[in-house]
Image: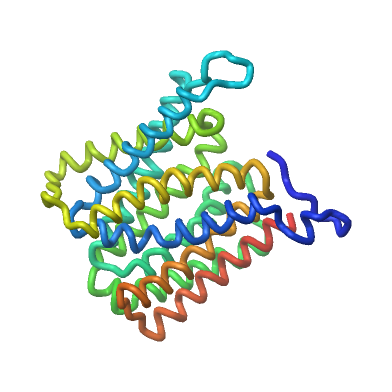
Amino acid sequence: MTSLSTSPASPAARSLPTVLLLALLACYLIWGSTYLAIQVALKSFPPFFQMGTRFLAAGTLLMAWVAWRKPQSGSAPKLPTKRQWMHALIVGALMLGGGMGLTATASVHVGSGLIAACVAVVPMMIAAWGLLWGRRPTRGETVGMLLGALGVLVLVQGASFSASPLSMVCILAATLCWSLGSVLSTTRFPLADGASGFASEMLCGGAVLMAVSLALGEKPAWPPRPEALLAWLYLVTLGSLVGFSAYLYLLRHATPALASSYAFVNPLIALLLGSAIAGEHLTAGEWGACALILSAVAAIFVSRRSR
């Protein structure tokens, strides 16, 4: 993985390249807006059905592009091996099956801004899961995890989550699944390189989501409402294909700290969109809890960047 030089003489230290800046803005704005899109799509598509069809469609398109694109050497495209498909099934089941499926379930009764604020604790949980592999958190990460735990504790006691305890359980379980899947994908179960790895994860995760949807007996409204269909298409194209591609580019051409900075920008975007478009109302206590969580993520971000 390459990283940007931070020396004073480096042009990259003074300003980000245009392509890198566009990728960063894509992760910030697109992923920040997907929380509202999930809620709009719920008007016609149940949680697990919505996420399952979204990732199956996006994964199929991305894998088709991988198979169609010919490497420069003229050889056959490099597709995942059987072992990598098994890794994709495990990681996809956790990150997409549990993470995204339960996030959509929680979104049925809780506003998109609060959901995004809860998801912001993922970097703290990743640091905590790292303890199982002997990675001791830095002082900044420890402070961040404590602040984040306090923020979540305050947030779940607010009016929104108090009215729906099941949503609280779902979003906390979702962050646990997503963070564990993230750690396993870089330690025990690495995916195939590049776009084929993302595609295999989306296909396997989508299949798990659809299996859960069938088991729960979910039934989409047909014909779907126009706004729900547009939101679903937005999630497939921009949310999955463009967003994941931008993130993949950041992982290859930016520092890990810069690539993961979306974690504390997305909640701000989601909160603003939820208030401005969906009319979501947060109490003073909920705003304070969101501020605590974002401060915690910022502390972890700064600590990792200095490391």
Question: Is 234 in front, or is 133?
Answer: 234
Asked which colour scheme the image uses, the reply is rainbow
Residue 156 in sight from this viewpoint: yes
Q: Is residue 136 visible?
A: no
Going 14% across and 47% down the picture, which residue do you hit?
A: 218
Q: Is residue 83 above or below residue 1?
A: above
Name the residue at 70% across, 53% down: 17
Query: Is 32 situated left or right of 209 in this image?
Result: right
Q: Is residue 210 above or below residue 111?
A: above
- Where, quadrant-wise, is the N terminus in this rendering? top right
Where is 270 relative to 242, above or below? below
* 274 displayed left or right of 307: left
Q: Compare residues 249 and 128 and report the one nearer the observer.
A: 249
Quadrant in which the C terminus is drawn: bottom right
Residue at the right extreme?
9
Q: Residue at x 55, y 63 (%)?
A: 145
**Residue 282, image quadrant:** bottom left
**Residue 248 location (% of width, % of height):** 56, 42
Q: Which residue shows up at 46% across the image and 66% down it? A: 267
Across and down, in percent, residue 33 comes to 41, 62
